[in-house]
Amino acid sequence: MSAGYVTVQWNAHKRRYDMLLWSAIVAYLAAFLAISMLTHQPPAEISVPVLLMRALGTAAFILLTVTISIGPLARLDRRAAPLLYNRRHLGVSLFCLGLAHAALAILFYGAFGASNPILALLDRPEALTSISAFPFELLGLCALLVLFLMAATSHDFWLKNLSPRWWKALHMLVYAAYAALVVHITLGPLQSERSLLYPILLSASVATVGALHIAAGLKSLAQDRAMARDTPAESAAWIDVCAVTDIPMDRARAVRPEGADPIAVYRYSDDVGECVSAISAVCAHQGGPLHEGKIVNGCATCPWHGYQYLPDKGQSPPPFTEKLPTYRVRVQGARVQVNPEPLAPGTPVEPARISATTAKAADA
């Protein structure tokens, strides 16, 4: 989260994140090369460029599997949310590995030919109708182009100017890249690979990605149904959310009015005392589940990327400019109620106060 367009707004967390990431990548490449050389002794040895190609390719595919698994994993277990915070760093690193793999493959297999190796791939239309002779390299090239597009637009400049909706739609192409790489590997290296390790790893990747996304989808569906079930019918323009005691301090309870976005109702303390405020539960950054986060330093904080909003204003603290719709809220006895009619993003709303007696009962 940055107020201006800088290359990377480094902090201690990001430095540790990237240091661990690239330490793991280097360690994997070194281990892959060392183990491969030990297990492929003469006369079955494999040349170092080919081993390095395999190391880079497998590292890129493993990292892609991890990258697209983090999202559903974070939906299933909040402890994975810190991995989501800098997922774009994984994407850029993934593209670098893929680019190195492609460059090495082109140099090793095509640099000494009479024609341009890339153009030679495109000049084989008859191969497109054959599975055994299919130019699987084209699928890898298509995936690499998608990864480049994602890496090139990973900065908040593009998120801001494309709008979160279109930026998110653009980055959903990662699944097309993943599918292309699965077919690229299946029609390419696996056709001549005798070891069962690679098909097992590929199958494990597809199974893991599929299972995590299905499980996360089912959980989200169950949560939406529970939220709709727990949201009473509107009465006199107010929705009865829950008892004050049902909202933990510095947390939120979400309700979803029929046909509308969910609302996050927060219980927290300010300079006056305990209170509740309500804002949209959909983060303005990438649509994250704001209600699954908590109040940090007086701000409602999205669990996905740390975007923050003042709960009584729906505005990010200065100098940031993101805004969310706000809602009128009140406390009737020991019950919290919210008006489902959204106010303009960033509209200040006086928090509803929790009496000392109610607050004491809530903490008991």
Image: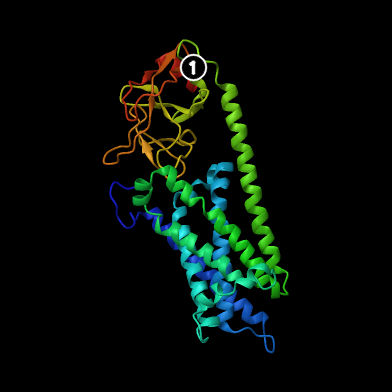
Q: How is the image coloured?
A: rainbow
Give me the residue at 33% from left, 33% from top: 315
Packing grade of label 1 (10 A; few <14, some 14-19, many >=20) is many
Image position, residue 230 (x, y; %)? 58, 22
Q: Please say whether residue 21 is visible from this viewpoint.
A: no
Judge by depth and name the residue closer to the eye, 315 or 39: 315
132 to the left or right of 169: right
What amino acid is found at the position of numbered circle 1 in the picture?
A: Ile
Q: Image quadrant of residue 48?
A: bottom right
248 to the left or right of 7: right
Q: Secondary structure at mark 1?
A: strand
Give me the residue at 45% from left, 20% from top: 340
Q: Which residue is mark 1?
A: 239
Image position, residue 37 (x, y; %)? 62, 81
Image position, residue 36 (x, y; %)? 63, 78
263 to the left or right of 138: left
192 to the left or right of 363: right
Image position, residue 248 (x, y; %)? 49, 27
With respect to residue 315, does 104 lie above or below?
Answer: below
Judge by depth and name the residue closer to the eye, 56 or 168: 168
Q: Residue furthest bottom?
A: 43
Judge by depth and name the residue closer to the eye, 142 or 304: 142
Q: Residue furthest front?
A: 126
With respect to residue 159, does 277 lie above or below?
Answer: above
Q: Please say whether residue 287 is visible from this viewpoint.
A: yes
With respect to residue 343, does 40 lie above or below?
Answer: below
